[in-house]
Image (tube, rainbow, N blue to C red):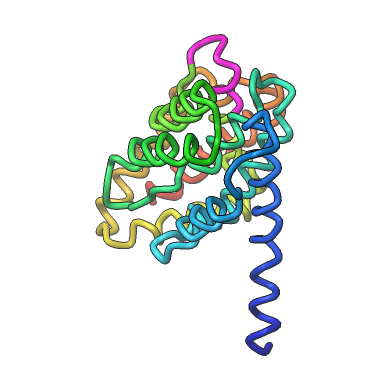
Amino acid sequence: MDDDTDQARRRGPEDALRRRWRDCLVRARHRAEGPDPLPYADNLLARWAEPQRKYHTMAHLTAVLDHVDTLAGHASDADAVRLAAWFHDAVYRPDRSENEERSAVLAERALPEAGVPAATTAEVARLVRLTVTHDPAGGDRDGEVLCDADLAILASPPKEYARYAAQVREEYGFVPEDAFREGRAAVLRQLLELPRLFRTPHGTAEWEPGARHNLRTELELLSH
């Protein structure tokens, strides 16, 4: 494959994401006028393409946006949730613990500059911070949609789930194997102890059983 063809192949998903960003941002601004949306998209896409990412990539961003679209009827403000999906892992360093906070601060800085009203900006930042715990309060419909969309990978078919687990391990390649297994197992047990992984009606009905099966399977594999 020559360089031009390879670049064109890579541009396809990026161009689709740029269009999705532009459409969402224009709706969120509630007016036609405003700064060009595309430089903001390019900045975010460059972040999502950083080399330390193996799972938290543009493919993950696309999947979360797709899941938000599936769940949009449950949201109070679906476009705020979509913007939060764009920002929720915009800052991502596997060896740091403040990624969600730094991502929220990035949203608080970028969105007003891009013409988004203050109330929507505040909601986006709140939703990004919520991904620290994935534990929205009862009645927090936007939070339920974002958290379910972000966790939907847990309910994927076994081969896709295995690829996700391998990508997470690769992102944490700097962690020794024994320490990784112990830490990952603790995360899986914590998830399995939750009364519900998913909060939306769709997530509860369609994703919960498969997700719990995948989590139990991975936990069993880690114990060997």
In the displayed structure, does residue 116 sit left or right of residue 184? right
Pick the residue in front: 199 or 17: 17
Pick the residue in front: 52 or 76: 76
Q: Quadrant of residue 196?
A: top right
Count of number-bearing discs: 0
Give the residue at the far bottom of this rendering.
Answer: 2
Q: Residue at x 40, y 41 (%)?
A: 106
Q: Position of residue 191 (x, y in %)?
A: 45, 30
Q: Residue at x 67, y 28 (%)?
A: 30
Q: Is residue 33 magenta?
A: no
Q: Residue at x 50, y 52 (%)?
A: 44
Pick the residue in front: 55 or 163: 55
In the displayed structure, does residue 215 sit left or right of residue 174? right
Q: Position of residue 175 (x, y in %)?
A: 26, 57
Q: Position of residue 83 (x, y in %)?
A: 57, 37
In the displayed structure, does residue 152 sit left or right of residue 201? left
